[in-house]
Image (cartoon, helix red, strand yellow):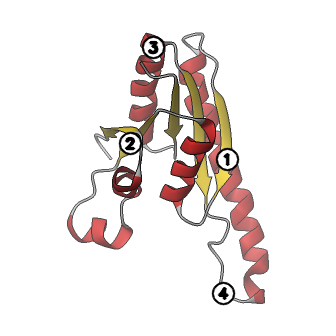
Amino acid sequence: MFKHILVPVDGSPASRQAVEKARAIASAFRSTVTLIYVIDPYAFTGMGADFSYGQSEYLGAATLEANEAISAAREVFEAQGMFVKGSVVEGHSIYQAILEAAETLGADLVVMGSHGRRGLEKLVLGSVTAQVLSHAHLSVLVVRGQDD
């Protein structure tokens, strides 16, 4: 039923739960799986030349964190004998980067976690999952995080 599953990861408990759900689905349907972690390379845009050193440090730390999250997710699949691809994707808008990756890869399902933020926290921080849901032209499975 699902040939290619895209799993955006961020290392959070909600993301780990989404990885487990994606593993089960991929196993059942023998799907190809791609893991991505989106980094905003422009986090320091508009802060001036004085922050270029800070931006370099940020990108290094963000890339390290991304690779660790992808490695941890990959281990879940490999423990079941499944091979998965993983990559770090750059994009100023995380939800758009996820949707662009899905389209480029030909994914037919996105499995992602939701932190379950509510009220003011959701308003201030936004919701990548909500944006993916409202703009996606493919199936999206949202795994609600517990104990976030």
Determine contact: label 2, label 1, CB under 8 Å.
no
Choose mark 2 or mark 3, whichever is in front. Answer: 3
The residue under label 4 is: 47
Disc 1 crowd rating (10 Å Cα; few below 14, some 14-19, many 20+) is some
Q: Earlier in the sequence, mark 2 or mark 1?
A: 1
Q: Distance between the residues labelled 2 and 3?
A: 20 Å
Kindly identify the residue that appears in the image at 45 percent across and 22 percent down: 2
Residue at image position (66%, 87%) is 47
1 or 3: tag closer to the N-terminus = 3
What is the number of the mark on residue 88? 1
The reply to whether the C-beta atoms of the residues labelled 1 and 3 are less than 8 Å apart is no
Q: How far separated are the C-alphas under marks 4 and 3?
A: 47 Å
How crowded is the residue under tag 3: few (<14 C-alpha within 10 Å), some, or many (20+)?
few
- Mark 2 lies on residue: 113
Residue type at mark 4?
A: Met
Number of other residues with Cα within 10 Å of mark 2, as a class: few under 14, some 14 to 19, many 20 or more: many
Q: Distance between the residues labelled 2 and 1?
A: 18 Å
For residue 127, which numbered disc appears in the image? none
Q: In this orientation, which residue lies closer to the viewer: 15 or 8?
A: 8
